[in-house]
Amino acid sequence: MRAVELLPARDLARRLAEAEAVIEALLSGQIDAVVDSKSKTPVLLSKAQDALRESEARFRCIVETASEGIWTIDTEFKITFVNQPLARMLGYPAEEMLGKALVQFVPETAAASAMLRGEHLRPENSDEDEIAFVRQDGSELWALLKTSPIRDTNGIYVGTLAMMTDRTHHRQAEEALRKSEEQYRQIVEATSDGILKVDTLARIVFVNRRFAEMLGYEPPEMIGLSVFAFLSAAAKEMVADSFRRPPNGRKDALDTTFRHKDGNDIAVNMAGSLLVDGEGQHIGNLAVVRDVTERKKLQSQLMVSDRMVSMGTLAAGVAHEVNNPLTAVIANL
């Protein structure tokens, strides 16, 4: 067995401190390598290079297999790196994008350029927003862009790292939903009937203009108030009972009265249904309200007219019955 020479504690501490200083200098870039005194070849440099190559290979594998598009931009807003997912998103070969200005891949509008330069590439902070880009074939791509500044070891801004998630299909779905909702709103506002929506506490969350006009209000005046504030005293219990009924797939219709802003009651026919969420939980009520005040008046007038006709017919019959004996009496005088 080879004997091991023990160093004095003071020398051991000194050499340990020297080794730590060398490692720190290597890591910080102050020296390039430690040379073996006998072989005169770099020792720690080769190990550091191997570790660096391994780290870079691992990083590139992660970047190239990510689902997000990743790129870096220098201080002149020129592209210095793109991964393959981002290149595929925009339809370009990755190498063709390098060195080009970022604004070449956004719509040719001052607003888009200013948005990227002024809002998303500021050195002092990170940001996140949806941005429109232009693919090589001219089609539009909407992406969620997350950016953060890149700084060197001295803290100086040297560029921007951006991660991009394709949101085109999501954006198209949102646009289709917006158009559908707009068409729905147009239908609701064009109908001659009033539309009323309340939450589970009977607070109004939506009324169309027709319903508000029935009661002499503007729609915003009614939002947030209890629907019972607009019902006549006689109608409150009737409507409350209708709202409490469990969902059964039918629309319950009832004749009731609302109170106009001027204090008069208006007769309505109201068809309502409970609203439920995807789990079947009650989330509110929807009602279609038709003003039948004039119809009720006409019905009342018709009933009076029919009653008068009936009374006239009865009176004529009585007169006829009385007239026959009188005629005989008079004839015998």
Image (tube, helix red, strand yellow):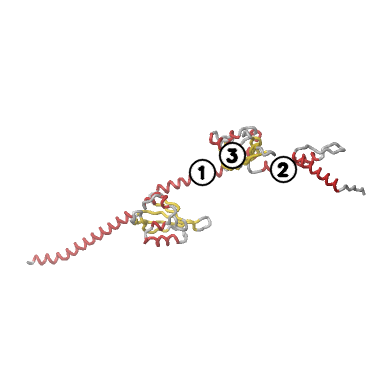
* Residue 324: percent from left, percent from top: 14, 65
Residue plotted at (43% across, 46% down): 186
Q: Is residue 317 left or right of residue 113?
A: left
Residue carrying label 3: 120
Viewer-nearest of discs 3 and 1: 3
Instruction: For label 2, count other residues whose C-alpha is less than 10 Å away and answer few (under 14), some (14-19) or many (20+).
Output: few
Instruction: For label 3, count other residues whose C-alpha is less than 10 Å away and answer few (under 14), some (14-19) or many (20+).
Output: many
Inter-mark Cα distance, 2 to 1: 40 Å
Residue carrying label 2: 58
In depth, the one of 46 and 324 nearer the eye is 46
Residue 50 figure quarter: top right
N-terminal label among 3 and 1: 3
Q: Amino acid at mark 2?
A: Arg
Say what secondary structure mark 1 lies in. helix
* Residue 333: percent from left, percent from top: 7, 66
Inter-mark Cα distance, 3 to 1: 24 Å
* Residue 315: percent from left, percent from top: 19, 63
Say what secondary structure mark 3 lies in. helix
Q: Amino acid at mark 3?
A: His
N-terminal label among 2 and 3: 2
Instruction: For label 1, count other residues whose C-alpha is less than 10 Å away and answer few (under 14), some (14-19) or many (20+).
Output: few
Residue 99 figure quarter: top right
Inter-mark Cα distance, 2 to 3: 28 Å
Viewer-nearest of discs 2 and 3: 3
Q: Is residue 319 left or right of residue 224?
A: left
Q: Amino acid at mark 1?
A: Glu
Q: Is residue 202 left or right of residue 169?
A: left
